[in-house]
């Protein structure tokens, strides 16, 4: 074994000393909670709002696709997972791919929203949000992208209305609730009732939802913090860690009315795998849309396992228009992580572009009017 | 010079998986969920009993208790929800009327 090269040894010592200093600095900042990154900062305008729901349009000067892309977010997590940090933002990526990106944010429910049901979102908010999207962009159709429970809302809207939807993209859509894991099993078997989940406001409190997600892998926090400790010298890593950590803890209350429907119909009757759902006084048939369908599933999704999303590939839309895509990563892979920006989003943007029309001019509508 | 994770981190990650898989199978079991449900129910019963006792004491002094305030908040929320519904109905009627006029 040859003796170590002194210059290499010196370089290594220098690097280790430098990293130790950076670790100390970043460690103090992390513990003090200072220097937290600002999340969801891609420039946008509110173009419509009703109650707490808002429709955002991300500013762009390079839109070259006719159909705007409207993201429908989940009811139980914050929408900024899809706009985490500048340079690591899904909406920023999609916008830079030439798409006119809109997003519906449901806000944070309180007592006033406790009675909100799926009908509130599917029949009241989404038709208006889509109309506002079309008015703002000057388009005739949208590409609807639903994430998690937002994918269920997107399916119900696209199939339950005469909806101007060119493409329907479902990201981690929970369809088969028989595959949704132990907490859902406790609800299904009646060991836990929906009323027991509600707080004084009539909603499922955010901290209960966080506990549910935390208990999926309670010791993973050790692995995450050990990895953080090793990479504490790396500002970029710390910034990304803090952003995801904040999002993970930042759940929103789940409106009691919708929870009751989730438990009664989705969990106990597992109604979605029948390919239809009786909602708002009519039966919504999931094949009742002419849109091109893309069902996107993540290989290591523990929140909505692949098996729970797979039925969407055979239930939603017309058979000849159905496609599916399997991507690497977990439930958050649509908003964060290396593979999101090297694989998931490029494939998603490419699919959307290939299923949309090219825009003749580069400037979209510029409406910033609010409406009800 | 290796750029891979250091040995201590590899060991921690390995230990976490070994321990984690056991903890996960425990907290994903029916027994665990039954226990959590029972604890939650007991907690609710306990706080309800405590609230009942404190309410009676506070009412003796003719003061409103937390439960009274909660009930008023619920009533206010119901009223506010109804107001929102009515204002939405009015907006829709106004929009329909406007369409008819044009």
Image (cartoon, grey):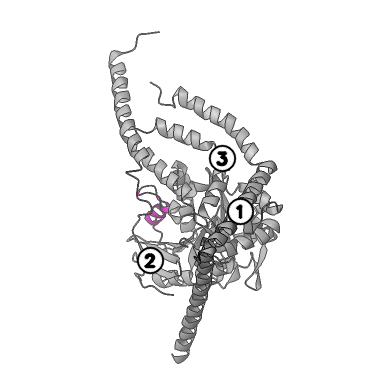
- Which numbered dot is residue A217? 3
Rendered image quadrant of residue A301: top right
For disc 1, the chain is B
| Mark 2 and mark 1: Cα distance apart in space | 41 Å
- The residue that disc 2 covers is A46
Residue A82 placed where, x, y %?
44, 53
Can you tell which of label 3 and label 2 is closer to the viewer?
3
Dot 1: element: helix
- The residue that disc 1 covers is B44
> In the image, what residue occupies the spot 61% across and 51% down?
B46
Can you tell which of label 1 and label 3 is closer to the viewer?
1
Q: Are marks 3 and 2 on the same chain?
A: yes
Residue A114 placed where, x, y %?
54, 65
Q: Is residue A197 visible?
A: no
Outermost residue, front side:
B60
Residue A257 placed where, x, y %?
59, 65
Q: How many marks?
A: 3
> In the image, what residue occupies the spot 36% across and 73% down?
A369
């Amino acid at each position: 074994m040859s003796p170590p090269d002194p210059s290499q040894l010196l370089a290594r010592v220098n690097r280790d000393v430098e990293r130790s200093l950076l670790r100390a600095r970043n460690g103090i900042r992390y513990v003090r909670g200072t220097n937290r990154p600002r999340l969801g900062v891609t420039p946008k305008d509110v173009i419509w709002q009703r109650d707490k729901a808002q429709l955002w349009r991300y500013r762009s000067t390079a839109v070259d696709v006719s159909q705007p892309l409207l993201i429908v977010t989940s009811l139980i997590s914050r929408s900024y997972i899809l706009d985490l940090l500048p340079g690591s933002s899904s909406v920023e990526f999609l916008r830079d791919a030439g798409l006119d990106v809109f997003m519906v944010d449901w806000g944070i429910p309180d007592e006033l929203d406790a009675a909100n049901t799926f009908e509130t979102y599917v029949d009241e908010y989404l038709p208006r949000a889509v109309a506002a999207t079309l008015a703002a962009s000057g388009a005739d159709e949208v590409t609807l992208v639903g994430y998690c429970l937002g994918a269920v809302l997107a399916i119900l809207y696209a199939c339950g209305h005469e909806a101007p939807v060119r493409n329907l993209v479902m990201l981690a859509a929970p369809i088969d609730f028989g595959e949704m894991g132990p907490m859902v099993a406790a609800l299904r078997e009646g060991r836990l009732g929906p009323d027991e989940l509600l707080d004084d406001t009539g909603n499922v409190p955010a901290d209960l939802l966080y506990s549910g997600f935390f208990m999926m892998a309670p010791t993973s926090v050790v692995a995450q913090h050990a990895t953080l400790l090793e990479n504490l010298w790396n500002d970029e890593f710390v910034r990304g860690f803090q952003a995801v950590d904040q999002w993970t803890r930042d759940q929103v209350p789940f409106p009691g009315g919708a929870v009751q429907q989730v438990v009664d119909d989705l969990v106990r009757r597992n109604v979605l795998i029948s390919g239809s759902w009786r909602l708002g006084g009519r039966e919504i048939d999931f094949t009742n849309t002419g849109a091109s369908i893309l069902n996107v599933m993540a290989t290591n999704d523990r929140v909505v396992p692949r098996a729970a999303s797979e039925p969407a590939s055979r239930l939603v839309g017309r058979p000849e228009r159905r496609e599916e895509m399997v991507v690497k990563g977990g439930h958050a892979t649509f908003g964060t992580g290396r593979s999101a920006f090297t694989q998931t989003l490029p494939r998603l943007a490419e699919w959307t572009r290939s299923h949309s029309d090219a825009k003749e001019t580069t400037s979209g509508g510029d409406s910033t009017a609010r409406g009800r | 010079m290796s750029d891979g994770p250091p040995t201590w981190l590899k060991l921690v990650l390995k230990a976490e998986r070994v321990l984690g898989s056991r903890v996960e199978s425990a907290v994903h079991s029916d027994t665990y969920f039954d226990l959590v449900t029972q604890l939650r129910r007991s907690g609710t019963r306990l706080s309800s009993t405590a609230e009942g006792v404190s309410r009676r004491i506070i009412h003796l002094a003719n003061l409103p208790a937390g439960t009274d305030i909660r009930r008023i908040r619920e009533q206010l929320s119901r009223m506010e929800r109804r107001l929102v519904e009515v204002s939405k109905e009015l907006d829709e009627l106004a929009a329909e009327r406007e369409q008819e006029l044009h």
